[in-house]
Amino acid sequence: MPISSSPSLLTVRGLSFSRNEEPLFGPLDFSVDVGEALLVRGDNGVGKTTLLRVLAGLLRADEGTLDIKGHAADRESRARAIAYLGHLPAFKADLTSLENLEFLCALHGRREGRSLEAAMATVGLAGYEDSPARTLSAGQKKRLSLARMWLSPAPLWLLDEPYANLDLGGIDLVNRLIVGHLDDGGATLVTTHGAYAAPPVKTRELVMQRAVWSGAE
């Protein structure tokens, strides 16, 4: 089989981050290719969430480089290539579920051929389109966040503890969305401290410890 000469979707070299002048993680070297899932493991407090926030451009690294498709990442390329799901829902409490999706799609774009109503149905929230976000349970808010990811045109998903606050049906939903995203030519980083499930796809692991790392190809 011929080896692809295309650059990795994401390439990280020598990435380090400190908090209050104390090293939190790094230096890290890893890459993520199209169709691949990278599982980021580690105990609480080792910097998994911080790593994803650095990759998304929400925090600045102390050192290191980050390339997207072979080019140095800047704000515009990150906005096009990366969709981030964090611990907190990025919703306006008094807007309805559908209005929140409309607002976020206006900011970040929408994948061609996917409707807001289809997104709600895909994540099991059909019938909640007119419900204000503040009335949703923690699990329903997580599902609404997953609807936003499903709508995003970004090829790289950064998923921070995506299985938290979900029942078994929700965990299965996350897995199905990840599998579908990889099949569509996307890639994902998924953080976990080991208490939740992992996606049922072939993954590589990046195991984080404070200020050091080890990765398995």
Image (cartoon, rainbow, N blue to C red):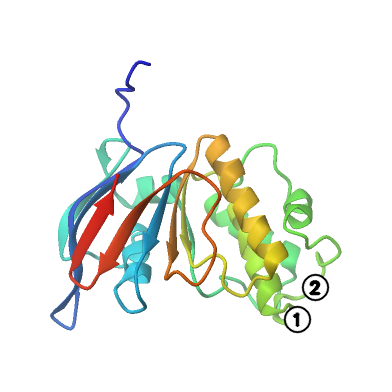
Q: Amino acid at mark 2?
A: Ser
Label placed on residue 131? 2
Using the rendered view, name the quadrant where residue 132 is placed: bottom right
**In the figure, 209 relative to 44: above or below?**
above
**Residue that extends furthest to the right in the rendered view of this protein:** 127
Q: For this rendering, which residue is in front, 8 or 59?
A: 8
Residue linked to disc 1: 135
User: Which quadrant does the C terminus fall into?
Assistant: top left
Percent from the top left, x then y, of residue 173? 67, 56
Q: For this rendering, which residue is in front, 23 or 151?
A: 23
Q: Amino acid at mark 1?
A: Thr
Left/right of residue 180 with respect to residue 4 in the rendered view = right
Q: For this rendering, which residue is in front, 168 or 141?
A: 168
User: Which quadrant does the N terminus fall into?
Assistant: top left
Asked whether the residues under the numbered discs 2 and 1 touch, taking CB atoms below 8 Å apart as contact, a structural biologist would say yes
**In the figure, 24 relative to 158: above or below?**
below
Percent from the top left, x then y, of residue 77? 36, 45
- How packed mark 1 is, by other alpha carbons closer than 10 Å (few <14, some 14-19, many 20 or more), is some
Q: For this rendering, which residue is in front, 72 or 141?
A: 141
Left/right of residue 181 with respect to residue 191 in the rendered view = right
Does any portion of residue 100 appear in the rendered image?
no
